[in-house]
Image (spheres, rainbow, N blue to C red):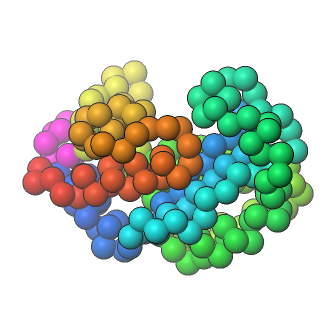
Amino acid sequence: MDRKKHRLEAILIAQKKLALNPIYLDVETTGMEALDEIIEIAVVDHDASVLVDSFVKPIGDISPSAYAVHGITEVMIKDAPPWAELWPHVEESLRGRVVGIYNADFDIRMMEQSHQINQMTWQPPYADQFCIMKLYAQFHGEWNPSKRSYRWQKLDAARGQCNINIPNTHRAKDDTLLAREILYYMADQKG
């Protein structure tokens, strides 16, 4: 395994992704299980302008473990639009675009679950998506022998490792902006 070569590949991929003017997405949820759903979503354009930044009123309750991470309360979301009402706006912002997500597998699963819980058919509107977390793991280069892949870094760890001064609040808009900066950081490196 050639970590230096893999790091250079990650830098080149980051540069190619940035050339596509991607948008960035992040969600906060009621929890991490099969019946959990989105309670906050943000979509930020390539120039950092905010396209979507909204709470979402879920059908279920926020788990104590999820609240401990993001601090979103039932009171904060009581007047928020439900997923089915908000989705057309989110869908329009994603339509035909390339989307960068820190931990894409989770956020996409939560969009699918929110659709299912609201009895909606999931059809990804974006042209493509990529995981900034997996790309950063390759860039960072810490090997995980048990998984035989590069170790994923939490968003806050990546923030610190890249010396980025955006706080990791575990809120959708801030985390989206932070993921964007991590991609820019990788693309700006020499190898």
Quadrant of the rendered structure where residue 171 is?
top right
Q: Which SS does the magenta portion mostly show? A: helix
Residue under the point 30% across and 73% down: 19
Image location (x, y in percent) of residue 109: 66, 48
Is residue 177 depicted above or below 145 in this figure? below
Is residue 171 depicted above or below 126 in this figure? above
- Comparing 143 with 154, the one in front is 154
Q: Is residue 170 left or right of residue 139?
A: right
Q: Is residue 151 left or right of residue 176?
A: left
Image location (x, y in percent) of residue 158: 33, 37
- Comparing 20 with 88, the one in front is 88
Quadrant of the rendered structure where residue 115 is?
bottom right
Image location (x, y in percent) of residue 110: 68, 47
Is residue 111 depicted above or below 49 in this figure? above
- Comparing 147 with 174, the one in front is 174
Q: Residue furthest left?
A: 190
Residue under the point 81% across and 58% down: 81
Image location (x, y in percent) of residue 180: 38, 56
Is residue 131 depicted above or below 66 in this figure? below
Q: Is residue 148 visible?
A: no
Residue under the point 25% across and 35% down: 161
Residue range of the region highlighted in magenta in the rendering: 1-7
Q: Is residue 191 visible?
A: yes
